Amino acid sequence: MEPIQIIITIALCIGALATLVFIIWLIAALFLMSKAKKAAREIGFTFHDAPFDRRDYPKMPLR
């Protein structure tokens, strides 16, 4: 194999591994978020109690 083929192969392997890690990270984040929402519901916190509710602020003027 020529050196350029080896470099391309290594780069593709690194890209594939990075993609797999990203997908696993995404699934873990979604899973933890759903657990956090369940825990918040159990203690009675609703997401409407959040201090940064959009409905508390007037609409932004359109220019």
Image (spheres, grey):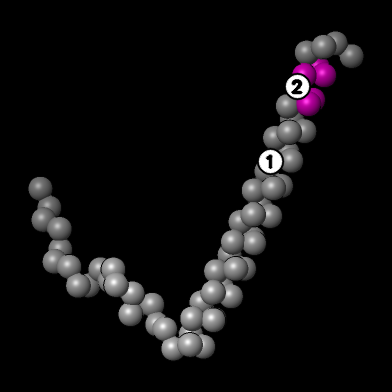
User: Residue 50: x percent and y percent?
Assistant: 33, 74
Q: What kind of residue is marked 2?
A: Ile
Residue type, label 1: Ala
User: For the residue carrying disc 1, how many other residues have a C-alpha within 10 Å: few (<14), some (14-19), or many (20+)?
Assistant: few
Q: Is residue 7 left or right of residue 1?
A: left
| Residues rendered magenta in the picture | 5-10
Give the residue at x 51% y 77%: 37
Q: Are marks 2 and 1 in contact (CB under 8 Å)?
A: no
Q: Residue furthest right?
A: 1
Quarter that holds the N terminus:
top right
Q: Look at 40% across and 82% down and name the residue there.
A: 46
Would you place residue 4 above or below residue 46 in this image? above
44 above or below 35?
A: below
Q: Quadrant of residue 11?
A: top right
Q: How many marks?
A: 2
Q: Secondary structure at mark 1?
A: helix
